[in-house]
Image: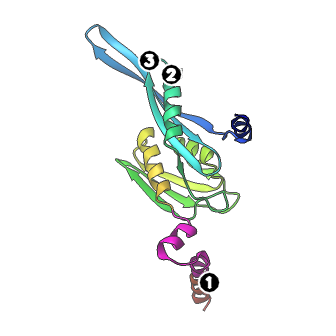
Amino acid sequence: MAQAVDRRKTEKKEELVEKLVHVNRVAKTVKGGRTMSFAAVVVVGDLKGRVGYGTGKAAEVPEAITKATNEAKKNMVRIPLREGRTLHHDVKGRFGAGKVVLRTAPAGTGVIAGGPMRAIFEVLGIQDIVAKSLGSNNPYNMIKATFNALEATNSPRMVAAKRGKKVGDIVSRRENTTNAKMEKEEA
């Protein structure tokens, strides 16, 4: 029994950051009139590459936010980051009419994104990224399109595992091709 107590003390509780993205007042028409409720969208992340989103609906705003937060914690995914600050490569995402383009950025660029995408990148821990929303500006579709793009990212380690090669072969190949392009341009 003493061991169980020791384990609880050594377990470090993970710090999650929550961001409220959108609250919507929803009216349902019934026989006696209208019933009002609130729908909330929340994004949760650990600032180290894990992020999730959730939606909740309730008669009161705080309850809706709580439901959305709990759903977001259940649906967290890990996203590979380069140097812990940006994505490994440019990527496009789509959900319904919502389309997003995410581009890597050099250090010091900051988060150049609007609305719900900014909230996702802040809780994810991305410090340098350029993102553009094309199509729908509905927060639900933008968030789902952004997650579609983020889940499509691959790290060099993942690509190497798929191809059965070493990470050094893949990364050095990319550097060699960029060097060859530069030499062609100079000539």
Q: Which amino acid does label 3 sit on?
A: Ala
Residue type at numbered disc 2:
Glu
Q: Look at the picture and state if 115 lies above or below 31.
A: below
Instruction: Identify the secondary structure beneath mark 2.
Output: helix
Residue 52 locus on image (x, y percent): 52, 43
In the orientation shown, which residue stands out farthest toward the front?
A: 1
Q: Which SS does the magenta portion mostly show?
A: helix
Looking at this view, name the residue that lies furthest to the left. 31
Task: Residue at 59% x, 75% y: name it.
Answer: 167
- On the image, numbered disc 2 is attached to which residue? 63
Mark 2–mark 1 Cα distance, whole angstroms, equals 56 Å
Where disc 3 sits, the SS reads loop
**Split into 4 quadrants, where in the image is the N terminus?**
top right
Residue 83 occupies quadrant: bottom right
> Circle 1 sits in a helix, a strand or a loop, which is it?
helix
Which range is magenta?
Answer: 154-175
The residue tagged 1 is: 179
In the rendered image, which residue does mark 3 sit on? 59
**In what quadrant of the picture does the C terminus appear?**
bottom right
Task: Give the distance between the C-alpha atoms of the residues marked 1 and 3, in whole angstroms.
Answer: 60 Å
| Coordinates of residue 147 in the picture (x, y in percent) | 47, 50
